[in-house]
Image (cartoon, rainbow, N blue to C red):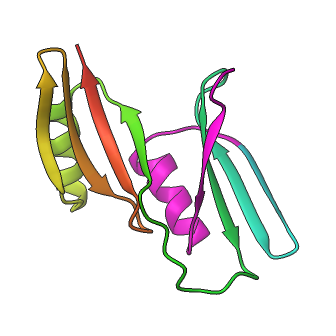
Amino acid sequence: MNFCWVTLHVGNFEESLAFYHEVLKLPVSSRHSGGGVEMAMLGKEGQPKVELLCDGNAQSGQKQSGISVGISVNSLEETMEYLDKLGIPVLRGPISPNPSTRFIFIHDPDGYEVQLVEMK
């Protein structure tokens, strides 16, 4: 078995799409809409994707919890400087569980935790 994607139910599709595509630089591999539902798959070809799903027919205010998305970065220092310039606060970290891994956590527009990981 191979991991394919994680689905995040979002409240504001365009805001979430901008966060994952423009801020975190994940390429949009597909985008569809219809029947009040908007969907986008983000990530590089041949790699697991983040699926953003916004159902305009769903009740608002439903909050997801216990979910985090992990994204690798080349340099944690450069990433933290970049986030600071955008006004995106670091929730926790940097954390280094071992000599070859360091990470921080931020929130996306819907409150999902995003773990940005540097692996040496």
Q: Is residue 62 above or below residue 48?
A: below
Report whether 61 appears left or right of 107.
right
Q: Position of residue 45 (x, y in %)?
A: 66, 24
Q: Position of residue 27 (x, y in %)?
A: 57, 37
Look at 12% across and 29% down and name the residue there. 96
Look at 50% across and 67% down and name the residue there. 15
- The part of the image, by quadrant, that contains residue 59 is bottom right
- The part of the image, by quadrant, that contains residue 120 is top left
Residue farthest to the right, as pictured: 35
Q: Position of residue 118 (x, y in %)?
A: 25, 25
Q: Position of residue 39 (x, y in %)?
A: 72, 58
Q: Which residues are magenta?
A: 1-29
Q: Is residue 22 above or below residue 27?
A: below
Look at 81% across and 76% down and name the residue there. 36
Look at 15% across and 51% down and name the residue there. 92
* Quadrant that contains the N terminus: top right
Q: Is residue 83 magenta?
A: no
Report whether 13 appears left or right of 71.
right
Report whether 71 appears left or right of 43.
left
Q: Is residue 11 magenta?
A: yes
Q: Is residue 120 above or below residue 9?
A: above
Tally of numbered tags: 0
